[in-house]
Amino acid sequence: MFTLDVDFSTDVERLVILGPSGAGKSLTLHALAGLLKPDHGRVVVDGETWLDTLRNIDRPTRARRVGYVFQHYALFPHLTVWQNVAAAHARWYPAPVEQETRSAVDEMLRAFSLGDVRNSYPAQLSGGQRQRTALARALAVRPRLLLLDEPFVALDTGLRERLRAELIAHQEHFRTPMVLITHDPADVSRFAQDVVELSEGRVVAASRRRPRVAA
């Protein structure tokens, strides 16, 4: 049985959770997103309590408005790029799409340079295009928190470095606080304003890497 016992806080826009495989990094993101309910604990984001087991508070995942980019992107293989991004507005699927939603999806495709592949399916995309589609979907509903689970692990070195730069540019444009988990020191170097290091389900180190970003 794996025990997750983590305690940390931050006031920066880019937090990196570092640790080896099996350290509890993904489980921590699941708890933040509401995909996992701890036996005991609290989750507070921007002053709003999402989880407090003592007070019987547990906001459902959708109410938390979290954007989640999984390690292998978890795109719907039977949907086009446009439809994958539109799926973030889950209320529409499979009903007809409202014009407001269409406009929002088109805006995200432009922001992530995906217009030329809007009608392509995930199997037809490059690794970079799949990642940008996953990011566009995660940011489509203007989430309060962006969670990324080792988004560069499946990419070659050159593409990985280019997409790191793109991710930082998009995060700074949308000003969405993000938590990125990794075991790669290069990710820490490029993204981290704060770092939390996990091992065997516990925080073993925490440090401030860069000055706090002003609101």
Image (tube, rainbow, N blue to C red):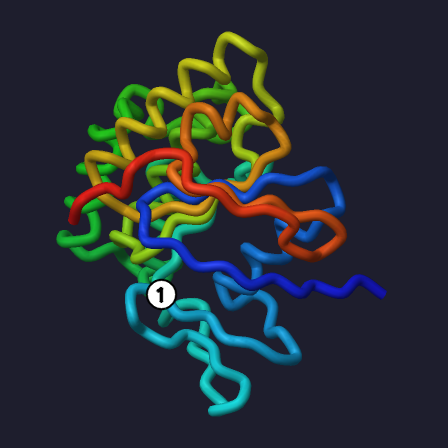
At x 57%, y 19%, the residue is: 155
**Side of 159 where 82 appears, left or right:** left
Q: Does 108 appear above or below 198?
A: above
At x 45%, y 68%, the residue is: 61
Where does residue 80 sit, x and y in percent of width and height?
A: 42, 36
Where does residue 22 sit, x and y in percent of width and height?
A: 75, 46
Where does residue 102 sit, x and y in percent of width and height?
A: 20, 47
User: In the image as oriented, which residue stretches furthest toward the top?
Assistant: 158
Where does residue 73 sit, x and y in percent of width and height?
A: 53, 38
Q: Does 177 appear above or below 169?
A: below
Quarter of the image holding residue 202? bottom right
At x 27%, y 32%, the residue is: 170
Task: Please count the marks in the image.
Answer: 1
Q: Does 64 appear above or below 205?
A: below
At x 53%, y 89%, the residue is: 54
**Foreground residue among 61 and 197:** 197
Q: Does 78 appear above or below 117?
A: below
**Foreground residue among 123 and 53:** 53
**Side of 213 where 189 appears, left or right:** right
Task: Please name the residue that numbered disc 1 is placed on.
Answer: 45
Question: What amino acid is found at the position of numbered circle 1 in the picture?
Answer: Val
Q: Is residue 149 visible?
A: no
**Side of 54 where 211 appears, left or right:** left
- Secondary structure under tag 1 reads strand
Q: In which quarter of the image is the N terminus?
A: bottom right
